[in-house]
Image (tube, helix red, strand yellow):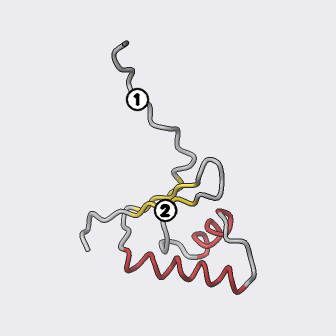
Amino acid sequence: MSPATRALLILDTETPPACFYALCGDPLFVIPHLADLVHHSDDLHGVLDVGAYRAYTTAHPGALPETDLSACPPATRPPGPQE
């Protein structure tokens, strides 16, 4: 896997969707942790939502993308020419 691999995870359970980013996102590392999150939630008969995701990333630092981009202001585009 390239060292330039990034991870971007979008959880479309809210409006606007929650978006988390990690500088290093090797799928061979991230996917098993996502599976663990799903199985853990299923075992507890819990709801798999953004709150559960945040709780998992707090309990398992570095396992899944943690940087919450949802709170970032939207990128601003410079105004184009007037038509």
Give above or below for 34 relative to 4.
below
User: Image point 37% across, 61% down: which residue?
Assistant: 23
Give the image quarter of residue 36.
Answer: bottom right
Quadrant in the picture for the N terminus? bottom left
- Closer to the camera in the image, 47 or 55: 47
Give above or below for 81 relative to 68.
above
Q: How many marks?
A: 2
Numbered badge on residue 52: none
Q: CA distance from mark 1 to mark 2?
A: 23 Å
Residue type, mark 1 in image: Arg
Residue picked out by circle 2:
9
Secondary structure under tag 1 reads loop
Sequence order check: which comes first, mark 1 or mark 2? 2
Residue picked out by circle 1:
77
Q: Position of residue 19 (x, y in %)?
A: 53, 55
Q: Position of residue 56 (x, y in %)?
A: 61, 73
User: Image point 36% across, 13% down: which residue?
Assistant: 83
Give above or below for 35 relative to 73.
below
Residue type, mark 2 in image: Leu
Along the horizontal axis of the image, is 59 left or right of 24? right
